[in-house]
Amino acid sequence: MINKTQDMNEMQTRMEQMARVIHNKVGKGMRLGIMFLGMIPATVLGLVACDEHRDFPDTGMKVGHILCTDGKVMSYEDYSLSGKEAIAVVFHLNRDEAMAGNGYAVYLHDLAPEAFADSIGIAQSTSADLAALDGNENTFALYETTETSSPIAEQVFELWKYGQSAYVPSVAQMRLLYASREAVNPYIEQCGGMPIPDSANECWYWTSTEVAGQETAKAWLYSTGSGTIQETPKWQAHKVRPIITLSE
């Protein structure tokens, strides 16, 4: 009887031990399962995040973008769907904080040939600096000179009816336009404008820069065919291609 009781006690003890082992294993498995399940959402979210990556459109201004008469600048694709009227094409982006504005746009059309000044003998207070991006300031100086008038300055001021601050570019600004002419010409043409010419008979434009030391008599012409400049008597009639400083 005692042996049977001992056997029963031993069996019960073993059963309790087995139960604890099973409990521990099951509990550990459950805990691991819970930990694994807890890791799944993060993994899935990571995969979803990768799957849902999108290349959002770059809305920044670029060379070749179109300036409209309402002052908006947009890509040619957006412009072609907008129903707006184009007035100029972006040809330079400003990367220098010292420069005014965010860039420059060139008008779609030339202005008719006119003289730099009605008469010679008067310095018109432009900077005469070949490296200065100061066409806007030069054009105001030409316009405000009272001793003589400037037909080219008067022409660009007529363009202000669109609300755009057009001006005669300086020599340095014409250099920037010359460097970008191949990039912008297709957009100018698509907008119905006149491309920047390179033929010898059509390529000479007035700048707003007087010749240093000869400010009373001469100003600089710029060739969009070769990128060269030529000092020229102010009374001669030549074309102007106005530009605009962009401030968006």
Image (cartoon, rainbow, N blue to C red):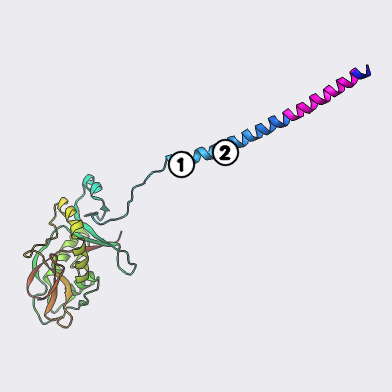
Mark 1 secondary-structure assignment: helix
Query: Is residue 17 on the magenta stretch?
Result: yes
Q: What x and y, as percent, mark residue 67?
A: 23, 55
Q: Which residue lies furthest to the top in this view?
A: 1
| Quadrant of res 19 | top right
Q: Which of 56 and 12 is in front in this view?
A: 12
Q: Can residue 246 be seen in this view?
A: no
| Quadrant where the image shows the N terminus | top right
Sooner in the amino-acid sequence: mark 2 or mark 1 = 2
Mark 2 and mark 1: Cα distance apart in space:
16 Å
Q: What stretch is highlighted in magenta?
A: 4-22
The residue labelled by disc 2 is 39
Q: Residue 9 colored magenta?
A: yes
Q: Farthest residue to the right: give it.
A: 2
181 or 233, which is in the foreground?
A: 181
When the figure is inspected, residue 125 is found, relative to residue 104, above or below; the finding is below
Q: Can residue 7 be seen in this view?
A: yes
